Image (spheres, rainbow, N blue to C red):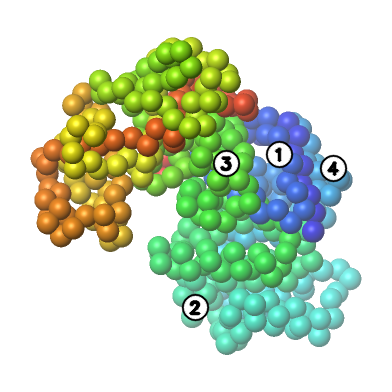
């Protein structure tokens, strides 16, 4: 059990590659924190600096109030699970799990090792495999052994670097649920790295969204979904991703309007009040709205704008409609399948004209230059700070 605090932590690799910029984060005891972002954004580097596997170029890392910058990994009381499992092929599952305990000096008694390994195996449901070698296990079982090996030690912080990335989609979903249960059982501080926003949203108490070595936003899953601070977070969190279109934000008296595709839509509810409280003036914006916040209208006059259907992805419980607006903007619209009758479903084919309207209460407004939300209260790296064209996974 421990808190972890990173203050102005920076990592500069040889050749002046800045992998992590001024990383500041306070992780509370027993919190489940997820670092998420595209490949190369500095997640593993940050995790490895906490583990002591990578030197810290600047700043301090504290575990339970003690600066650990110069402590060896073994003296930091952390446990780490890697993406590639890193099991020893010649050892049985039991000995793989016992391995970190056998290294302890003074020696841990065999009876204690036996107790810890069998308990962890019980929790993970791998008791029947303890005498097997790793090659006789499936991917999911191997991953459980790797987690078990990390569990047997007394540790203050549990670190996991993409532990589910090598599993197929179905197993990944199952293991995700198991990690949620595991977390309840071992009740310690977790720092979990992933490039997958669904994993981040479902596992994290708080999510740290990273890009190019910068923290783009920190918040609970609900906060980052409902109130993205910048365009990057808006598009990264949520699937299918948020639609972004050019618009103006118009202030008329006490009311605000947006006008994408020649429409004019009032900004409703709390969003309008927040714009007014910040006294936001009329300006060009990038307007964001999620695929689920658009409605299909039967009656053209009740709609805000017209689009043409290009692709209908039938997902089972919902349809993802890829549509083109009259100005050429491409959008994704998400419609619960249950809202359409059989005939309407059959008609959802290439070229069909659809009439759509917005949910005005859940729009997002971004400055086109800085890409920061007009309603953001947090500091956020600006577009000009970031590298462009970073390849994504
Ligand atoms: N040993 C290293 N030497 C030089 N650059 C590195 C090294 N390890 C990682 N990097 C660079 O640091 C950046 C962050 O890498 P990493 O932390 O592995 O990202 P992530 O885990 O988010 O995919 C990348 O640009 C990567 O190329
Ligand atoms: Mg990584």
Left or right: residue 84 versus residue 287 is right
Q: How many marks?
A: 4
- Choose between 121 and 313: the one closer to the eye: 313
How many residues crowd mark 3 within 10 Å: few (<14), some (14–19), many (20+)? some
Q: Which residue is mark 3?
A: 223
Up/down of 241 relative to 58, above or below: below
Residue 275 image offset from top left, x and y in percent: 52, 22
Q: Secondary structure at mark 3?
A: helix
Up/down of 316 relative to 304, above or below: below
Residue 198 shows which numbered tag? Answer: none
Callout in the foreground (4, 3)? 3
- The residues tagged by marks 1 and 4 sit, at their Cα atoms, a distance apart of 14 Å
Mark 2 or mark 3, earlier in chain: 2
Q: Residue at x 37, y 22 (%)?
A: 258
- The residues tagged by marks 4 and 3 sit, at their Cα atoms, a distance apart of 30 Å
Residue 256 seen by the camera? yes
Say if mark 2 contacts mark 3, CB within 8 Å.
no
How many residues crowd mark 4 within 10 Å: few (<14), some (14–19), many (20+)? some
Up/down of 289 relative to 273, above or below: below
- The residues tagged by marks 3 and 1 sit, at their Cα atoms, a distance apart of 17 Å
Q: Residue at x 63, y 51 (%)?
A: 205
- The residues tagged by marks 2 and 1 sit, at their Cα atoms, a distance apart of 38 Å
Residue 236, image quadrant:
top left
- The residues tagged by marks 2 and 3 sit, at their Cα atoms, a distance apart of 40 Å
Residue 25 shows which numbered tag? Answer: 1
Q: Which residue is mark 4?
A: 67
Mark 4 or mark 2, earlier in chain: 4
Q: Secondary structure at mark 1?
A: strand
Callout in the foreground (2, 1)? 1
Q: Secondary structure at mark 4?
A: strand
How many residues crowd mark 2 within 10 Å: few (<14), some (14–19), many (20+)? some
């Amino acid at each position: 059990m421990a808190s972890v605090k990173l203050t102005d932590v920076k990592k500069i690799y040889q050749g002046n590659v800045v992998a992590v910029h001024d990383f500041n984060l306070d992780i509370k005891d027993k919190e489940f924190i997820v670092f998420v972002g595209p490949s190369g954004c500095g997640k593993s580097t940050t995790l490895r600096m906490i583990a002591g596997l990578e030197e810290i170029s600047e700043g301090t890392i504290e575990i339970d109030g003690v600066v650990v910058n110069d402590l060896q990994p073994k003296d930091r009381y952390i446990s780490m699970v890697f993406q590639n499992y890193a099991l020893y092929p010649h050892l049985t599952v039991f000995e793989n799990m016992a391995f970190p305990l056998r290294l302890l000096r003074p020696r841990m008694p065999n009876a204690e090792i036996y107790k810890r390994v069998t308990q962890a195996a019980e929790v993970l449901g791998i008791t029947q495999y303890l005498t097997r070698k790793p090659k006789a296990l499936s991917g999911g079982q191997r991953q459980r052994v790797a987690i078990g090996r990390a569990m047997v030690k007394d540790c203050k912080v549990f670190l996991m670097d993409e532990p589910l990335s090598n599993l197929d989609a179905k197993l990944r979903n199952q293991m995700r649920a198991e990690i949620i249960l595991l977390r309840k059982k071992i009740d310690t501080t977790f720092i979990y790295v992933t490039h997958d926003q669904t994993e981040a949203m479902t596992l994290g108490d708080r999510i740290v969204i990273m890009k190019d070595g910068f923290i783009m936003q920190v918040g609970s899953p609900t906060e980052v979904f409902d109130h993205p601070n910048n365009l990057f977070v808006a598009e990264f969190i949520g699937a299918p991703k948020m639609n972004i279109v050019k618009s103006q934000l118009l202030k008329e008296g006490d009311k605000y309007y947006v006008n994408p595709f020649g429409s004019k839509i009032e900004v409703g509810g709390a969003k309008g009040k927040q714009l007014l409280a910040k006294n936001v003036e009329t300006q060009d914006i990038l307007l964001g709205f999620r695929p689920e916040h658009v409605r299909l209208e039967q009656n053209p006059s009740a709609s805000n704008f017209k689009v043409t259907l290009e692709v209908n992805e039938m997902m089972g419980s919902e349809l993802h409609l890829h549509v083109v607006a009259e100005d050429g903007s491409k959008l994704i619209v998400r419609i619960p399948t249950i809202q359409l009758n059989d005939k309407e479903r059959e008609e959802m084919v290439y070229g069909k004209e659809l009439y759509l309207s917005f949910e005005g209460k859940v729009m997002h407004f971004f400055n086109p230059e800085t890409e920061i939300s007009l309603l953001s209260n947090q500091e956020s790296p600006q577009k000009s700070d970031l590298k462009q064209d970073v390849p994504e996974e």
